Image (cartoon, rainbow, N blue to C red):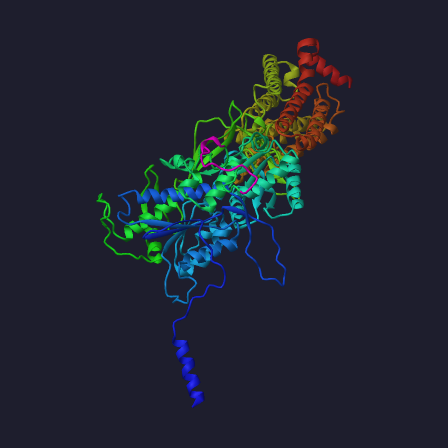
């Protein structure tokens, strides 16, 4: 029975309501205001003291120190927005909005502690054993300053479906809705800023840069996106360094030394404000100046850096800042702060004491604060209200929550009397409902800016492009030189103002930052071994190749009939070479050819005029005239080798040459045979001349010539010569020539001529000493010896002569051999006819013969 009773008692105990017992002191808000709607706020009002916990001791809460005026300014912006909403009848009419603002002291641990306090709704009964069913009446949380802190808080509150709206956490990782389903922000994601920075670097033509980042979620993830973007643009990174506020000074010194000794002149700094501050102190000590800084929104518009000393390092810096908004009344509200507004508030008192270096407590040695001090007379980070970029983000975050609740409660827009509620739905409203409404919120602020969140909880990505400039009074100004709007099409996202940009080192021109100078047209890039692609040598393009763009990777080949110019930056039409009538060599050869024709015609005229004389009649005058005709044709055919090759000229030049020379050699061969036959006929009882009379001589010449005609006909039918542009022999020019078509046919033509010449030479050599006063054999022998010598020497000269000189050699051989035949055979006869007429008689001929 006892055992049963104990079991029943245990079941009853488990069935009781659980109790809430606070195990430690609660986190208390630094600013509070009750209302129907509560908006939480977590700011970093202080820094942290460096404390070390022993391993065996219970960890104590971090201690805060040093007031942060910037965060105090942000908290005042939140309070201003809440008060403005409460005083407005257009939004949440009849519904009061309150706030609870906590201090996280740059500690993720204290930030999470503040978030837990907002969720648990501490009140006057928090130390009693009451039920834990009660839910928090906080409907949204505004915070925090820094991506790492925000990530910690977002992970804690996501299970409770409380919306968290950040005004400065830019890490792209927070756009992951599966990881952070209740997170929203009024500042663009670093995804857009990183890509904008990459486009900025490309816009100014920098390809060799250094990078510095904060060693936290903000810097690491933002820089990772930036590096990926610039690598796609072909930009190289010389070094990448990390900085964090808690790093030992040795690491900061090392980073500053890397920056100082690097060859890149442009530095992209993806740093938070505090990390940039410690790096700047070291850069100042090492006097690192003259570098072009490209900054992220974390520090580029920080007024704390706008000093003449810092300008020596960061002068001319360019970067993206959060768009500035002119919120009516906000500046005056911030400058009208006074301890009397919230008597007894510890943070307000601390702010006043820190600002004016006085004490609110009379028991201290410091001068006592009167409360009449004028905030407007002070110059520090809080009182500098020339730009309220981040405070305007806090302002927009509060209004986003208010408009979500306004839509959720179905409030009417018309103005109503004070105290009359015009919202249809009754309170309370659950935080998860606010999350759903925030996804659809879309409103326009009083200063005309449209506010909405995309499916990732991010606003429209818009930035001001600012430039550090110093005016004539020595004051550092953040001059807006353009804007970046990610919603615009690619290539049009930058809109630059027509404002002069100040560059690092007081330059008036864009600084260069490249590992290697650009490769000009006519060269190509060759990557240096072991170095990034931005470090390269410029190699001139080879002959016949070109590059017509800067930094070409490869040289392109020119078309076959083109060649690269001297600079190798474009192709020019190759010089087409052929033996023309206009050049000196062509003129000389044409003159020699025409002279040969004229001389041959003159000899023919002399022979015709003295055709009845014994010298002309002595050795078959018909063959002599035919030989003169063939020589005239030989001289003339050389003209077909000069001029631009065409199908007609290529066809006729070699065939005419072959046929006319065979005709010429055939006539000489017939004359040689006649001499031999005539001597044989003088012997007693020999009548051989009847077998080689005039008819047989004509037939022999015709037969020999027809064989060559047949060879040429077959050549033209099977594979005729044709005009051809030879692009192989020379790279720099085109040889316009007549291709033989069939080299075998060409060599057959030459071979046949050589065969007849050899036969003629042999017979003439045998008849050179025959006893005849007008024996032509010895002249024919000499002429054929000259003919054969010319054409034997022609073969190697023809093969080795390039281009148009091949044609010139062939013409020279034709003319030389023709002149040799003309002069050797006909010059002695013309000499007798014209200069020794007394020997041109039958008596002389007969007498000479009898003497012999």
Q: Predominant secondary structure in magenta?
A: loop
Residue 765's spot in the image, x, y percent? 74, 28
Q: Is residue 158 above or below residue 637?
A: below
Residue 608 visible in rendering: yes
Q: Position of residue 134 (x, y in %)?
A: 36, 63
Nearest the eye: 9 or 666: 9
Tell me where the magenta segment starts and ends, as one range: 363-378
Q: Viewed as shown, does residue 663 lie left or right of 437?
A: right
Most extreme residue toward the right, as rendered? 851
What percent of the width, then of the height, locates residue 399? Answer: 35, 45
Q: Please tell me in which quadrant of the rendered image residue 119 appears.
A: bottom left
> Residue 376 colored magenta?
yes
Q: Quadrant of the N terminus?
A: bottom left
Q: Is residue 634 in the magenta section?
A: no
Q: Residue furthest front?
A: 363
Q: Is residue 460 visible?
A: no
Where's the C terminus, which quadrant? top right
Q: Where, by quadrant of the figure, is residue 433 drawn?
A: bottom left
Along the line of sight, which residue is nearer the eye, 206 or 308?
A: 308
Q: How many numbered discs sit on the rendered protein?
A: 0
Q: Residue 517, image x and y in percent?
A: 61, 33
Q: Nearer the viewer, residue 169 or 770?
A: 169
Q: Above or below — where is 586 with respect to 448?
A: above
Looking at the image, which residue sits at the far bottom?
Answer: 1
Q: Is residue 100 above or below residue 470?
A: below
């Amino acid at each position: 029975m006892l055992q049963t009773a104990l079991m029943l008692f245990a079941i009853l105990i488990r069935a009781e309501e659980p109790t809430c017992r606070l195990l430690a002191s609660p986190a208390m808000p630094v600013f509070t205001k009750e209302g129907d709607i509560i908006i939480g706020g977590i700011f970093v009002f202080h820094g942290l003291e460096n404390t070390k916990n022993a391993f065996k001791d219970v960890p104590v809460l971090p201690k805060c120190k040093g007031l942060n005026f910037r965060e105090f300014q942000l908290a005042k912006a939140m309070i201003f927005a809440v008060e403005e909403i409460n005083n407005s009848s257009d939004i949440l009419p009849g519904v009061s909005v309150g706030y609870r603002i906590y201090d996280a002291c740059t500690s993720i641990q204290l930030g999470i502690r503040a978030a837990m306090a907002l969720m648990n709704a501490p009140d006057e009964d928090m130390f009693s054993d009451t039920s834990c069913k009660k839910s928090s009446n906080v409907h949204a949380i505004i915070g925090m300053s820094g991506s790492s802190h925000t990530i910690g808080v977002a992970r804690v509150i996501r299970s409770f479906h409380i919306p968290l709206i950040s005004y400065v956490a830019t890490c792209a990782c927070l756009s992951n809705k599966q990881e952070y389903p209740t997170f929203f922000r009024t500042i663009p994601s670093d995804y857009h800023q990183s890509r904008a920075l990459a486009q900025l670097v490309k816009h100014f033509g920098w390809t060799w840069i250094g990078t510095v980042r904060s060693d936290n979620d903000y810097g690491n993830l933002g820089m990772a996106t930036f590096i990926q973007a610039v690598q796609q643009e072909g930009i190289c990174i010389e070094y990448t360094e990390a900085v964090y506020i808690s790093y030992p000074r040795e690491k900061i010194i090392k980073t500053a030394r890397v920056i100082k000794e690097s060859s890149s002149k442009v530095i992209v700094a993806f740093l938070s404000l505090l990390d940039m501050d410690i790096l700047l102190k070291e850069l100042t000590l090492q006097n690192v100046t003259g570098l072009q800084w490209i900054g992220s929104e974390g520090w580029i518009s920080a007024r704390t850096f706008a000093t003449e000393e810092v300008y020596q390092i960061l002068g001319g810096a360019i970067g993206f800042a959060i768009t500035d908004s002119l919120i009516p009344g906000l500046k005056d509200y911030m400058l009208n702060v006074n301890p009397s507004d919230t008597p007894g508030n510890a943070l307000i008192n601390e702010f006043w004491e820190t600002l004016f270096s006085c004490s609110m407590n009379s028991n201290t040695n410091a001068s006592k604060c009167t409360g009449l001090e004028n905030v407007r007379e002070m110059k520090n980070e809080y009182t500098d209200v020339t730009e309220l970029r981040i405070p305007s983000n806090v302002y927009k975050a509060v209004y986003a929550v208010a408009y979500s609740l306004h839509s959720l409660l179905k409030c009417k827009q018309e103005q109503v009397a004070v105290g009359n509620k015009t919202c249809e739905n009754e309170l309370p409203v659950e935080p998860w409902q606010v999350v759903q409404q925030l996804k659809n919120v879309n409103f326009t602020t009083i200063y005309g800016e449209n506010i909405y969140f995309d499916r990732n909880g991010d606003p429209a990505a818009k930035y001001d492009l600012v430039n550090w400039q110093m005016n004539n009074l020595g004051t550092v100004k953040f001059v807006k030189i353009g804007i970046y709007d990610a919603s615009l099409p690619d290539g049009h996202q930058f809109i630059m103002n027509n404002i002069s940009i100040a560059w690092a080192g007081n330059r008036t021109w864009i600084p260069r930052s490249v590992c290697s100078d650009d490769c000009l047209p006519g060269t190509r890039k060759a990557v240096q071994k072991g170095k990034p692609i931005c470090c390269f040598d410029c190699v001139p393009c080879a002959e016949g190749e070109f590059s017509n763009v800067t930094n070409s990777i490869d040289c392109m080949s020119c078309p076959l009939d083109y060649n690269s110019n001297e600079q190798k930056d474009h192709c020019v039409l190759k010089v087409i070479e052929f033996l023309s009538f206009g050049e000196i060599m062509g003129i000389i050869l044409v003159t020699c050819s025409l002279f040969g024709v004229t001389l041959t015609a003159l000899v023919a005229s002399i022979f015709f005029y003295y055709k009845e004389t014994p010298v002309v009649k002595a050795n078959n005058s018909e063959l002599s005239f035919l030989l003169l005709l063939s020589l005239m044709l030989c001289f003339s055919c050389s003209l077909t080798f000069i001029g631009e090759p065409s199908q007609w000229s290529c066809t006729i030049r070699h065939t005419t040459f072959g046929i006319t020379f065979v005709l010429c050699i055939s006539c000489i061969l017939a004359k040689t045979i006649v001499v031999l036959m005539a001597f044989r006929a003088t012997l007693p009882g020999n009548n051989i001349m009847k077998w080689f009379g005039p008819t047989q001589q004509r037939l022999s010449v015709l037969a020999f010539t027809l064989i060559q005609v047949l060879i040429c006909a077959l050549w033209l039918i099977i594979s005729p010569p044709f005009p051809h542009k030879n692009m192989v022999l020379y790279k720099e020019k085109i040889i316009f020539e007549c291709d033989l078509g069939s080299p075998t046919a060409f060599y057959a033509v030459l071979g046949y001529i050589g065969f007849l010449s050899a036969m003629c030479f042999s017979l003439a050599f045998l008849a050179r000493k025959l006893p005849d006063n007008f024996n032509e054999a010895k002249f024919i022998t000499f002429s054929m010896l000259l003919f054969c010598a010319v054409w034997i020497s022609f073969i190697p000269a023809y093969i080795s002569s390039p281009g148009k000189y091949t044609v010139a050699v062939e013409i020279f051989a034709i003319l030389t051999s023709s002149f040799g035949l003309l002069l050797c055979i006909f010059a002695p006869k013309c000499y007798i006819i014209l200069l020794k007429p007394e020997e041109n008689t039958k008596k002389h001929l007969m007498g000479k013969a009898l003497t012999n």
